Amino acid sequence: MDIVPLQPADYQSIVFFTGAGMSAESGIPTYRGKGGIWTKYHWEQVACEEAFRRDPEKVLTFHRERRLEVAACRPNSGHRIIAALEQQHPRVTVVTQNIDGLHGLAGSGRVIELHGSLWRLRCPRDGQRLEIKPGNDYPDRCECGAWLRPDIVWFGDNLDQDVINLAMESLAECDLFVSVGTSGTVWPAAGLPQIARRNGAYSLEINPEASENSRLYDQAYRAPATQVLPRLFPSVTGPVRA
Ligand code: NAD
């Protein structure tokens, strides 16, 4: 596959818009694809507010299992290239749908987590938030006695308005928009490529398969993230032999 390398210095502000495919090569399955979570579980039973009210222990057990899976995975070379680029360029932002924390673990500093994080808990009663770390124990209940829920966006939840605003700010200034590993089926996140396009950003899609939004991109690379990103940004990684 021919990949035209990009010169990061040609752009003022770069946004990486990432989805589950970004972490697939770290060993974290996508949700919808083969072997994905929703082929084994019903989200109605483990990933919505109603399920949490009905059976909090079942929902918390499901998320404890997800944390154990994610804790066993490391950032891949794609995450690391994005993090390294931030060291070289004044404006690199990651807007991610992922809840796994792997961008941060790779060293990215400007990460907007649209759907929250598995590594943060929230008390639905008093709004307290609690950061947790892989390997450390954490409580199931808040000091006020309420069950602590994962601070992630479940089915039927609204996105945090402050987080949306941050994402919109980054899109408003972005002139290079690189989408990695998202199917474009989860809204409102799926609307971001259209906004980037309207704002005049040059946009690329990295995904082995066509997505709902493929027609919106100026360029598409149909290959896994770790094969495309090093060739796209050789100034970060050094020349990559084909
Ligand atoms: P999705 O599962 O709907 O789609 C994943 C996309 O990634 C697909 O289009 C697939 O073709 C592509 N893909 C698979 N392997 C790839 C690779 N190696 N390189 C590049 N692309 C690859 O994921 P989504 O669009 O992110 O939406 C799913 C929702 O589920 C999101 O809200 C996300 O928060 C959540 N989710 C998060 C994680 C995580 O945190 N790692 C994992 C699964 C799902």
Image: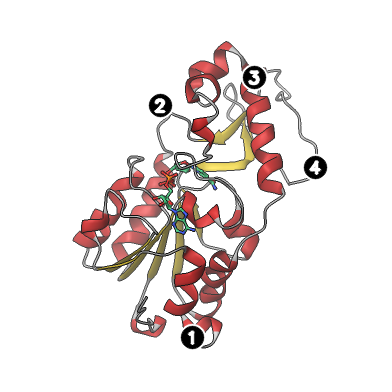
| Residue 132 locus on image (x, y percent) | 71, 42
Image point (33%, 47%), residue name: 184
| Residue 189 locus on image (x, y percent) | 35, 46
Q: CA distance from mark 4 to mark 2?
A: 30 Å
Can residue 195 be seen from the camera position used here? no
Q: Mark 1 highlights which residue?
A: 235
Give whichever of discs 1 and 4 has the lower sequence position. 4
User: Which secondary structure, mark 1?
Assistant: helix
Q: Mark 4 highlights which residue?
A: 136
- From the viewer's perspective, is 195 left or right of 76? left
The amino acid sitting under disc 2 is Gly
**Nearer to us: label 1 or label 4:** 1
Image point (54%, 26%), residue name: 41
The amino acid sitting under disc 4 is Asn
Q: CA distance from mark 3 to mark 4?
A: 20 Å
| Residue 142 locus on image (x, y percent) | 70, 25
Circle number at residue 156:
2
